[in-house]
Image (cartoon, grey):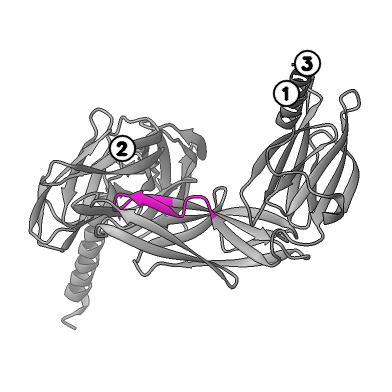
């Protein structure tokens, strides 16, 4: 009985010891492995060797360390190891923990590889992998494949990226928010790039293959289209525009019927501020407003969406949507943006465009300059004049710094024709100039003489005739 109890206790102790050992592999003879790296590492440090990435972390208060091992050829694994124990990673790597010093945060370790038998670990060269090589989507959706490029070479490499599908889909590689076509990967390290696949709304149901190529390595990826997303495809040439207050703004909208039957699509817009007006037209010269459009099977139609903000609108950015409603009552929306800035325009008026004057006598032309824009001021406003030679023209005031929107500035132009000028019609040109706009007008000036001058001329003629008559009477008969 006593002997049986001793054997049972020994067996219990052996079982407890076995539970403390990592369950990844049985202990192997020391001569089967060769050390390739040994020494002290800090907690949190990553050791890179022969294509393996090994991270060591001290588990505080447990006299144990967490060891994370990953490589291009095998799945990532985590192990918890106490002092004087080890783990074996896919028979290709053995990690031994000799000592754990929590106070200094260091670990004494030894990394070994098999000398015979077992796996030789990750192969050299380049390998590609994707955690989600097959994805489902609706027609028209965007799908993203994360591709891991593992450089197992002993030199840094810059890889060229390309992709094909034969579907007509838009394919591009990205890193962050940037499109890329090359990527640099240091030796014995990996880099992840995303392959963005923009499917087409016209794509039929079923599995489609995309092949991503990194230099001479290929990886096949798959998208299974589960259903057609919509019966129409709606596109716009430009989604954001900048215009001045008071302008009419036009957005090009193209609707493509994806079905094999004629369809009627309703047209609308949402998100517009109060008192804004919109309408769909066939072209810019059309005066007819469209509430719906008929598109034949597999056909398409180009339309204009006209946006008219009120003149009282404030400057700033405005967001709204063009909406096309299918016969199935599905609403297809396109986000649009409009940035409105202050408008500037000028009007130039006078009470009349024709004036009468006498030689040498001055007269005034009042010119009214109005800022007919919205928001912004006219700046450095003044008049330039062009008159016949010898005429004197003076402008008051010479100029003004600014005219605010809706305000008017009066300029007085004093014109003095020469005193010896003959009676006739003459032209004077007045141009209003500012930093933002110019206007120009021509004025007709009619020069007249005093009414007694013709009488004096007539009297002189009468006297001359009378004198001739007297001379003729006195001397004419001899």
Characterize the local packing of mark 2: few (<14), some (14-19) or many (20 or more) Cα atoms within 10 angstroms: some
Position of 32 with respect to 467 (left or right) is: right
| Mark sitting on residue 12 | 1
Q: Residue 32 placed where, x, y %?
A: 82, 55
The quadrant in which the N terminus is found is: top right
The quadrant in which the C terminus is found is: bottom left
Closer mark to the observer between disc 1 and disc 3: 3
Specify the quadrant of the image occupied by residue 155: bottom right
Q: Residue 73 placed where, x, y %?
A: 64, 57
Residue found at x 80% / y 55%: 113
Which range of residues does the magenta coloring cover? 130-143
Q: CA distance from mark 2 to mark 1?
A: 75 Å
Judging from the image, what secondary structure is the residue with disc 2 in?
strand
Upstream in the sequence, badge 3 or badge 2? 3
| Mark sitting on residue 320 | 2
Judging from the image, what secondary structure is the residue with disc 3 in?
helix
Residue found at x 36% / y 70%: 166
Residue found at x 60% / y 71%: 215
Characterize the local packing of mark 1: few (<14), some (14-19) or many (20 or more) Cα atoms within 10 angstroms: few
Vertically, is 458 above or below 472? above
Residue found at x 74% / y 48%: 53
Position of 456 with respect to 147 (left or right) is: left
Callouts 2 and 1 close, C-beta under 8 Å? no
Q: CA distance from mark 1 to mark 3?
A: 15 Å
Upstream in the sequence, badge 2 or badge 1? 1
Specify the quadrant of the image occupied by residue 332: top left
| Mark sitting on residue 2 | 3
């Amino acid at each position: 009985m006593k002997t049986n109890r001793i054997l049972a206790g020994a067996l219990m102790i052996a079982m407890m010891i076995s539970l403390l050992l990592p369950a990844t592999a049985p202990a192997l003879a020391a001569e089967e492995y060769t050390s390739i790296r040994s020494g002290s590492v800090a907690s949190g440090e990553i050791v890179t060797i022969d294509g393996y990435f090994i991270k060591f972390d001290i588990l505080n208060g447990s006299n144990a360390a967490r060891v994370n091992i990953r490589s291009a050829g095998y799945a990532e694994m985590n192990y918890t190891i106490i002092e004087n124990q080890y783990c074996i990673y896919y028979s290709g790597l053995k990690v031994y923990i000799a000592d754990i010093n929590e106070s200094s945060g260091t670990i004494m370790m030894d990394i070994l590889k098999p000398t015979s038998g077992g796996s030789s670990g990750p192969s050299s060269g380049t390998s590609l992998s994707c955690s989600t090589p097959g994805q489902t989507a609706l027609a028209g959706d965007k799908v993203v494949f994360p591709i891991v490029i593992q450089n197992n070479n002993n030199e840094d490499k810059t890889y060229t990226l390309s992709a094909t599908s034969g579907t007509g889909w838009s394919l591009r590689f990205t890193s962050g928010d940037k499109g890329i076509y090359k990527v640099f990967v240091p030796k014995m390290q990996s880099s992840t790039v995303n392959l963005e696949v923009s499917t087409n709304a016209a794509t039929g149901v079923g599995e489609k293959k995309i092949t991503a190529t990194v230099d001479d390595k290929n990886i096949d990826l798959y998208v299974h289209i589960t259903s057609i997303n919509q019966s129409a495809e709606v596109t716009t040439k430009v989604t954001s525009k900048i215009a001045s207050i008071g302008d009419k703004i036009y957005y090009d909208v193209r609707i493509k019927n994806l079905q094999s039957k004629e369809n009627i699509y309703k047209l609308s817009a949402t998100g517009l501020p109060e008192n804004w007006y919109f309408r769909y037209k066939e072209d810019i010269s059309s005066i007819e407003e469209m509430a719906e459009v008929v598109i034949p099977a597999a056909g398409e139609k180009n339309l204009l969406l006209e946006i008219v903000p009120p003149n009282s609108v404030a400057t700033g950015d405005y967001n709204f949507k063009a909406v096309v409603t299918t016969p199935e009552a599905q609403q297809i929306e396109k986000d649009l943006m409009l940035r409105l800035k202050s408008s500037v325009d000028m009007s130039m008026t006078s009470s009349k465009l024709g004036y009468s004057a006498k030689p040498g006598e001055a007269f005034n032309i009042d010119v009214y300059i109005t800022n007919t824009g919205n928001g912004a001021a006219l700046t450095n406003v003044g008049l330039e004049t062009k008159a016949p030679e010898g005429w004197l023209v003076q402008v008051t005031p010479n100029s003004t710094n600014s005219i605010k929107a809706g305000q008017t500035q009066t300029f007085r132009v004093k014109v003095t024709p020469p005193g010896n000028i003959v009676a006739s019609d003459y032209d004077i040109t007045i141009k209003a100039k500012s930093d933002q706009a110019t206007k120009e007008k021509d004025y007709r000036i009619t020069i007249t003489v005093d009414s007694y001058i013709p009488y004096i001329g007539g009297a002189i003629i009468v006297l001359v005739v009378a004198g001739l008559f007297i001379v003729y009477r006195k001397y004419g008969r001899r």
